Amino acid sequence: MKYLDEYRDGALARRIAAEIASISTRPWVLMEICGGQTHTIMRYGIDELLARNVELVHGPGCPVCVTPLETIDKAVALALRPGVILVSYGDMLRVPGSQLDLFRAKAQGADVRIAYSPTEAIKIAHANPDRQVVFLAIGFETTAPANAMAAWDAKRQGLTNFSMLVSHVLVPPAIRSLLSSPHNRIQGFIAPGHVCTIVGYEEYEEISREFRMPMVVGGFEPVDLLEAILMLVRQLEASKACVENQYVRAVSRAGNRVAQRVVNEVFEVADQKWRGIGGIPASGLRFRSEYAAFDANLIFDLAPIATEEPAECISAQVLQGLRKPTDCSAFTTRCTPETPLGAPMVSAEGACAAYYHYRRHNLVALEESK
Amino acid sequence: MSGKSIIDMVCPVPFTTSNTVLLGHGSGGKLSNDLVRDVFLPAFGNPELAQLNDQAVVRVGQSRIAITTDSFVIRPLFFRGGDIGSLAVHGTVNDLAVGGALPLFLTAAFIIEEGLPMDVLRRVAQSMQQAAKAAGVRIVAGDTKVVERGKGDGIFINTTGIGLVPEDLNLSADRAQPGDVILLSGSIGEHGIAILAEREGLEFESALQSDSAPLHELCAAILSASTSVRCMRDLTRGGLSSAMNEIAAQSNVGIELNETAIPVRDEVRGACEMLGLDPLYVANEGKLIAIVPPDVAHSVLRAMRANPRGENAQIVGRVTGSLPGLVTMKTPLGTSRIVDMLAGDQLPRIC
């Protein structure tokens, strides 16, 4: 199948891995930002192929993982209100809130529906004029245009029974926060391909200059990631630090201007809390005042909810690439996808879940043998 | 909704057990297995049930009888490649056939929602009769209940089937041994994606159909090719992954699949890529896996390929003595990864 087979070609992948090995003079520490990339790395064992040359640490780019516990709790509370239909992306339903997840709220009688796109929530609102339809609008820059478009459409159509519980996060402030940390070990970044499809990579060029940090915009297939790693290692071996684009079939430097316009029309940049990490200034999106009528936080008068994460969970360090899931004493014992202590064990894009689902058979043994 | 507020409920994180039944308990994954282990086995426990095969084989007089039951709830009722009626026959016939039984008789119970057009019921009944005829079984008893409008989803069907098992045949999911070879009868994921496509209004360049089909002839062909077949499983709602994990657990062996050998049609791959699903976990209704000793693998494969339901059959993996209970897969890159059983249903990813 075109655009898939050539990027999953085992022989080509091994050739690139061999080239990385031949040009590396020392092991390099690289971070892939996006949870989708972490997923591919673990699924295809790219870390295993490159074990001697590159240490891959996993970034905070799992939208489900970094959505604050309070947002989940608010979504559950809203879903349980009579007359409310809560619509969400599928993988949010299993994320534990402080007391319930949305699946269990559904089993208690809440009307929770899975949608592939927020425009489906608009259709549900039209079909149920006597109910309040709330869309749980989370994600990075990738999902922001579709979510913004839904609010834009709802306003244009004069919908009065549709709102959104928004918890949007932005990648560049998170990268700055990681690089400003005294504990930072990262020597190069695989920038998130899907995010850059929307926003381009001009802002990444600023970060690269400011921190003298090599960055390569990477795709999501195994050959994409190996190429991106090769490009980063070439930069590092040559003491260069610039932004290159491996994912040229999807990403341009300027990004998608139309998508950026609709996001700017509907949302403005705001401070944002990241689950596990804490507050990062100017790292999120909230509704502009013209769209306040669609802000579920305002129209439902949701009381602030105080929450606490389980003490044993090290997801904060995992999400910042400071520790690996296998460093956690609860990994595969007290923390599994069925009994998760933190969100990275729940989401398909979470680093802990990727380690658990794909590689616990050799990673745990590998760590113990060290 | 219950009048009890969530504030009264103290449900600690993590949610290790559930006080209520979740949709995931019906997914065919780990949660379904939990339900069987925690509720049904303690309640009904007996040696036949404890085998945990798709069918129980019991002795009645001089005969060995295979018995199985299955309920069918599906939306839409009619889909490309089948309908709830033909599915209800194929599912039960296949559960008998993979146990080595010659399927003979079915019963059918209908739970019908008030307001269902009579024409729909007639079409379903006709489809069941055609499917039964093609599978060589007769529907010999039945039951009907009608529930109030809104309390059902059009129609639910339960079928129970019995068949005869030859005296010397013993197929069971606990018989796989290190060195055995795993044969898959054809490309995976077509039923699940065809249903999803109808539900979500997805269009493909070529019409993807459910693979719903009776497998009794394919099973007979496999058993004629070799008398040393260890076990067979039809792949249903939990996909290839659930069947492999169940066998690995019941036989206490490792299973190693080869990713590049597993056939997946382009339409299924494309839809799975788009929706963030993995074909290994997508439902099938006309595919099976057979586990056989290595010396007969190629003769069984030839027999499978000579049958129309197995013409794309492949050797997709082998049974190993390492990592008992675990299913792993060799990736195209030559590395190894786990193929886990899912907790509940596969969920579409956010991006």
Image (spheres, coloured by chain):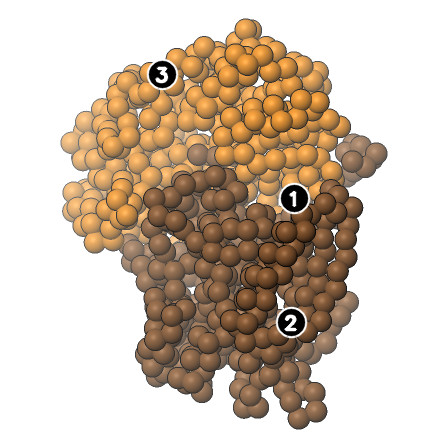
State which chain disc 1 sits on. Answer: B
Task: Identify the mark at residue A258; answer none if there is no mark.
Answer: 3
Residue located beneath label 2 in the image? B139
Distance from the alpha carbon under mark 1 to that under mark 3: 42 Å
Pointers 1 and 3 within a single chain: no
Q: Residue B164: which quarter of the image?
A: bottom right
Q: Cβ–Cβ below 8 Å for labels 1 and 3?
A: no
Pointers 2 and 1 within a single chain: yes
Q: Position of residue B269 (x, y in %)?
A: 37, 49
- Amino acid type, callout 1: Pro
Taking depth in this image into account, of B216 and B146 the one nearest to the observer is B146
Q: Residue at (71%, 22%) from the top-left corner? A: A130
The chain whose colour is brown is B
Residue located beneath label 1 in the image? B14
- Name the residue at the right extreme: B3
Q: Cβ–Cβ below 8 Å for labels 3 and 2?
A: no
* SS at badge 3: helix
